[in-house]
Every structure is written in C-alpha cells, then in structure tokens.
Amino acid sequence: MSKKLENKVAIITGGARGMGASHAKRFVAEGAKVVITDILEKEGKAVADELGENALFIKHDVTKWDEWQNVVSTAESKFGPVNILVNNAGIGFVKLIEEITEEEYRKTVDINQVSVFLGMKAVVSSMKKTKNGSIVNISSVAGLLALPQYL
Ligand SMILES: NC(=O)c1ccc[n+]([C@@H]2O[C@H](COP(=O)([O-])OP(=O)(O)OC[C@H]3O[C@@H](n4cnc5c(N)ncnc54)[C@H](O)[C@@H]3O)[C@@H](O)[C@H]2O)c1
C-alpha cells in the first residue's frame, strides 16, 4: 500500500513530546521527511534519533523570526522545499482573570498566536517552489467554548 506522505517535507513545531512527537512519528511512518522543532533540545533530539535518517531536530523558539528563517533554510538544505507546516507548539494554563498577569497573557498570545503568523510567513516562499503546500494550525476547543479559568 502506498504511503500518504511519500516525497513530502514537513516541519512540525513543538515536536519534542506530546501531540507534536506523535505527529512526527506518524508522518515518518507515512513516508515524509520531518523537521522537528522545539525549545526542549534533549527531548526533541531523542524523538528525531528514534525516527532515524528521515527526521531532523532543530532547537527553535517559535516566537523568534530569525529562528523560523533558520528552520526553513535548514529544512530545505537537508530535505528540499517544504510542503507541510504543522504549527503545533503551544502552551495553556488555568487561572482566574484577576490572577493572570499581563506578562503571562502576552507570553501566551506570543507563543500560541504570533508564532503561527511567523511560521506561515516563513514557509510560504519554500512552498511556492513546488506549488504544493499544506499548513495545519493546531488550536483548541477552548477557542470554541467559554471555559471558566481557561486561557
Ligand atoms: N493535549 C490537549 O488536550 C490539547 C488541548 C487543546 C489544545 N492543545 C494544543 O495542542 C498542541 C500540543 O499539545 P500537547 O498536549 O502535545 O502539549 P505539550 O505541552 O505536551 O507539547 C507542546 C510542545 O510545545 C513546546 N513549546 C512551548 N513553547 C514553545 C516555544 N516558544 N517554541 C517552541 N516550542 C515550544 C513545548 O516545549 C512542548 O514540547 C498545543 O498547541 C496545545 O495548546 C492540546
């Protein structure tokens, strides 16, 4: 049976653990070459090592534009133009609005939202090279429902 992601190059952010690591494993199993990025260097490298030659880990803070540029150019040099971006990195915590600080709120918006804009902006010229691209922005049911205390 043919694999669904043969000849595809993917970037998956927040891939050192949890859902991102799970996406990376399935993508490689489906034939993709995957660049896993995260701020967690040890865990991210371990996931890439487990996946072998079709995976590469790059330390990457998704809130930093210059680091996005490095991720896309390294992905291209190692595997070729990028076809898939999964904006998976994110944080969440439960706190009352009276308790949450402006700094915590701004940090959350930076990691969960601004990073998605930076990722799409960084990858689009690479995707245009093959006229082939898919971008998956992981969100949350918290964006659809009013959940008490959940930012
Ligand atoms: N698991 C759930 O039930 C659930 C529910 C709603 C939304 N989500 C969203 O799905 C995504 C994955 O969730 P998860 O449960 O696997 O979370 P997780 O915390 O296990 O994994 C998130 C990863 O993102 C990384 N990360 C955090 N800040 C980063 C930054 N600035 N730069 C790069 N990487 C960074 C973390 O180091 C971590 O490895 C997140 O965006 C999360 O908000 C998950």
Image (spheres, rainbow, N blue to C red):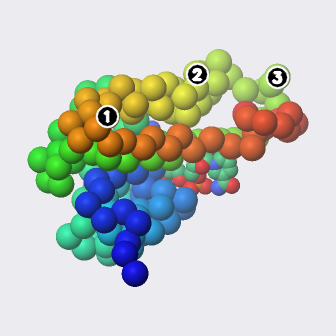
Question: How far is disc 2 from disc 3 in space, using C-alphas?
Answer: 15 Å
* Residue position marked by numbered label 3 in the rendering: 98
| Residue 140 shown left or right of residue 44 in the figure | right
39 or 1: nearer the viewer:
1
Q: Disc 2 or 3, which lies upstream in sequence? A: 3
Mark 3 to mark 1: distance in Å? 38 Å
User: What residue did someone put label 2 on?
Assistant: 106
- Residue visible at 68% across and 22% down in the picture: 101
Q: Secondary structure at mark 1?
A: helix
Quadrant holding the C terminus: top right
> Could you tell me the amino acid type at mark 2?
Arg
Question: Would you name the residue on which mark 1 appears?
Answer: 123
Looking at the rendered image, the disc whose residue lies closer to the viewer, 2 or 1, is 1
* Percent x, y of residue 2: 37, 75
Label placed on residue 95: none
User: Disc 1 residue type?
Assistant: Val
Query: Horizontal and vertical percent for residue 22?
Result: 49, 65
Residue 98 at x, y percent in the picture? 82, 22
Q: Quadrant of residue 103?
A: top right
Dot 3 amino acid type: Glu
Q: Say whether disc 2 or disc 1 marks the residue closer to the N-terminus.
A: 2
Establish if 119 lies above or below 4. Answer: above
Which percent across, then down, holds residue 50? 32, 75
Instruction: Name the residue: 86% across, 34% down.
Output: 146
Q: Quadrant of residue 16?
A: bottom left
